[in-house]
Image (cartoon, rainbow, N blue to C red):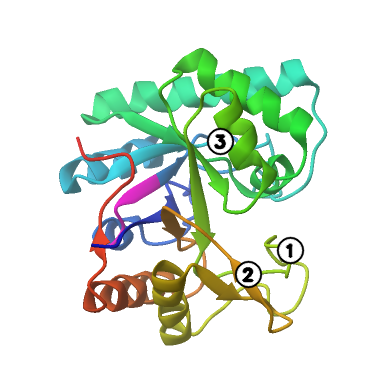
């Protein structure tokens, strides 16, 4: 039977600023990428999200980012190796403490936003992130952009790479994501997105924005929690995959 994970970026509230509907998304996804405070997420909100994940048996991952609250972690940065390694270690450690208090644990790492896209192509920054993850726990998997060089780079140092596809993002012919600065980068039709993900799981391909076919072998599907209509989008993806006979479950397992 075909099997796939559905993940979403959660825990991104910050004080009076509310981002997404974590409670609803936790009833749909099988893995939760929880903010660690660098791009979003205050301690109280993160703890609340972690408790919700624990109650629902949703696997938790550390959603590490550049230190960029104003830009929501979506601005490119060029930290030194030492800075980036320390930043990632710090974020994973902070989430581990909160997760323990919530009755769960951090089972994987997924970089966020600009950091995610940068290390998909920048071997230097990718190496710093990998050193940080392995310094905390060599058994932690790293979620990576499917078809990126990072998959092989991670596996070369003994880190399990989890290739990921994006339900609600447009793809370039190269397999990279279309920049959010460009029109059409974020997809909005739940039914179209859901059918696209069934095809990706079944056939291993998605259609790029120029109409060409991109080969994607993914173990996890991301539906962004901050997208407009994110809950409807995630529910449509889950329902369509379920109807197609795809088994849903986290690559990281359950508590």
Residue 226 in the figure: left or right of residue 107:
right
- Residue 20 point in image, percent of width and height: 43, 61
In the depicted structure, whether residue 2 falls above or below residue 136: below
Quickly name the residue at label 1: 174
What residue range appears in magenta?
28-32
- Disc 3/disc 2 C-alpha distance (Å): 27 Å
In the depicted structure, whether residue 252 falls above or below residue 248: above
Quickly name the residue at label 3: 64
Q: Pick the residue in front: 225 or 205.
A: 205
Tag nearer the camera, 3 or 1: 1
In the depicted structure, whether residue 103 falls above or below residue 39: above
* Disc number placed over residue 214 in the picture, else none: 2
- Residue 15 point in image, percent of width and height: 48, 45
Label 1: state its secondary structure: loop
Residue found at x 69% / y 23%: 128
Disc on the earlier residue, 3 or 1: 3
Main secondary structure found in the magenta portion: loop
Q: Pick the residue in front: 130 or 200.
A: 200
Disc on the earlier residue, 3 or 2: 3
- Residue 157 point in image, percent of width and height: 58, 22
Residue 241 is inside the magenta segment? no
Q: Quadrant of residue 221?
A: bottom left
In the depicted structure, whether residue 45 falls above or below residue 129: below
């Amino acid at each position: 039977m075909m099997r796939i994970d559905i993940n979403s970026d959660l825990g991104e509230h910050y004080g009076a600023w509310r981002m997404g509907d974590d409670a609803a998304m936790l009833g749909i996804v099988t893995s939760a990428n929880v903010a660690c405070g660098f791009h979003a997420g205050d301690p109280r909100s993160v703890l609340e999200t972690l408790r919700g994940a624990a109650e629902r048996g949703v696997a938790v991952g550390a959603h590490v980012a550049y230190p960029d609250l104003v830009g929501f972690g979506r601005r490119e940065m060029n930290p030194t190796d030492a800075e980036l390694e320390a930043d990632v270690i710090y974020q994973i450690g902070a989430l581990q403490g909160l997760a323990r208090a919530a009755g769960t644990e951090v089972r994987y790492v997924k970089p966020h936003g600009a950091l995610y896209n940068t290390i998909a192509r920048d071997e230097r920054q990718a190496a710093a992130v990998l050193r940080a993850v392995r310094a905390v726990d060599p058994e932690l998997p790293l979620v990576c952009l499917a078809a990126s060089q990072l998959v092989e780079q991670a596996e070369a140092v003994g880190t399990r790479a989890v290739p990921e596809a994006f339900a609600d993002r447009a793809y370039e012919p190269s397999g990279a994501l279309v920049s959010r600065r460009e029109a059409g980068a974020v997809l909005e039709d739940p039914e179209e997105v859901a059918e696209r993900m069934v095809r990706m799981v079944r056939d291993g391909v998605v259609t790029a924005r120029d109409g060409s076919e991109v080969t994607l072998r993914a173990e996890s599907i991301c539906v962004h929690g901050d997208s407009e209509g994110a809950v409807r989008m995630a529910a449509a993806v889950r329902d369509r995959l379920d109807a197609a006979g795809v088994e849903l479950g986290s690559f990281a397992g359950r508590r």
